[in-house]
Image (tube, helix red, strand yellow):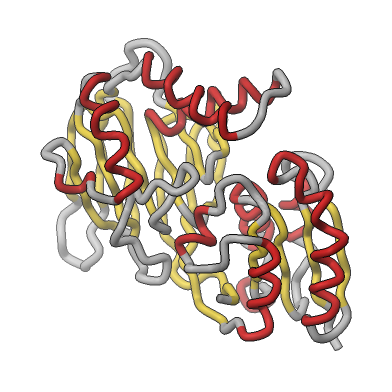
Amino acid sequence: MTSTLIIVNPASANGATAQRWPALAAQLRACWPGPIETVMSTAPGHAIQLASTSAGRAALICVGGDGTVNEVINGLMHINATQRPPLALVQSGTGGDFARALGLPKTADAAVASLASAQPRRIDVGEIAYMKGRELRTRYFINVAGLGFDAEVSHEIARAGERGHKGKAVYFLSVFKSLSRLRNHPLRITLMPQTNGDEPQTIECRSSMVAVCNGGFFGGGMHIAPHADPSDGAFDIVLLDSMSQLEFLLNFPRVYRGTHLTHPKVRIARASALRIEQMSVDGEPVRLQAEGELLGTAPVSFRLISGAIEVLV
């Protein structure tokens, strides 16, 4: 019988996953059929390498947070589509936004218990081409990528992590630091047509944030794209037009409730491919994040790959 590969990020949930793992491992052995092989990721990027070796496995189980899921997805996308194993998610991180988007259990114990009755579901995957300095790079994502404010928050969190600071307090402090430097970038957004014969749509604006969404949640529970469906073959794009710091602060709580879409300075669009360019650089280039991981800067192109991954839900 083909074995199942389990990739565990012991550093996720600020190290709590390492403590939880022995009990979770016993639960998995009791409920999961067939042989199991477990590997631990040891450094940023390691889970990409580990997942890329899972071709032909019965399944791949990811134990960690959204950053770990992002790495596993990138590893799976290096495998031929016919050889990619189905993916099961055991949420054990600080955010859990993609698990939330799929309606999966919020705790690792409950996630393991639900695996016995899980059914496969085809999920779309986003591909990003972006700049890292002068180098053009490619990255995949499964939930939400964004430019502007949310990427600045990721930048602040990364800086805090380099100093050894982690946890929810760091996240909220990073939000307010980023808000104090809120900038509205001049952007050109080109939405590629979903129907043959249609013309591309171009939006030119000053924007504090653009979120390109496959799933509906980011930032630890913010309902950024309430209508997003990771199986529908299109991104939901949420664009925040030029806002002052006070406007942004007053409306920020609405994102948790998913009621921000009615604000006159919030635009929504749908596309399966788009390009975002910075029309002028007045200071630093606009930053890009995916699944909370800081990647690079604009210009950036997005492409949706329909039904690329099978997830057990």
Q: Residue at x 57, y 34 (%)?
A: 168
Q: Is residue 32 found left or right of 114 in the rendered image?
A: right
Where residue 277 sits in the image (x, y, percent)? 32, 32
Residue 180 vertical position relative to residue 226 in the rendered view, above or below = above
For the N terminus, which image quadrant? bottom right
For the C terminus, which image quadrant? bottom right
Q: Can residue 226 be seen here?
A: yes
Foreground: 77 or 182?
182
Residue 280 vertical position relative to residue 209 in the rendered view, above or below = above
Where residue 195 sits in the image (x, y, percent)? 21, 67
Q: Is residue 262 found left or right of 21 in the rendered image?
A: left
Q: Residue at x 19, y 40 (%)?
A: 266
Where residue 309 sits in the image (x, y, percent)? 56, 70
Foreground: 248 or 7?
248
Q: Can residue 134 be seen here?
A: no
Location of residue 132 by image quarter: top right
Q: Residue at x 31, y 38 (%)?
A: 253
- Residue extending farthest to the bottom is 1
Q: Is residue 130 found left or right of 252 in the rendered image?
A: right
Where residue 82 sits in the image (x, y, percent)? 64, 78
Q: Residue at x 23, y 44 (%)?
A: 260
Foreground: 70 or 285?
70
- Residue extending farthest to the top is 283
Q: How many marks?
A: 0
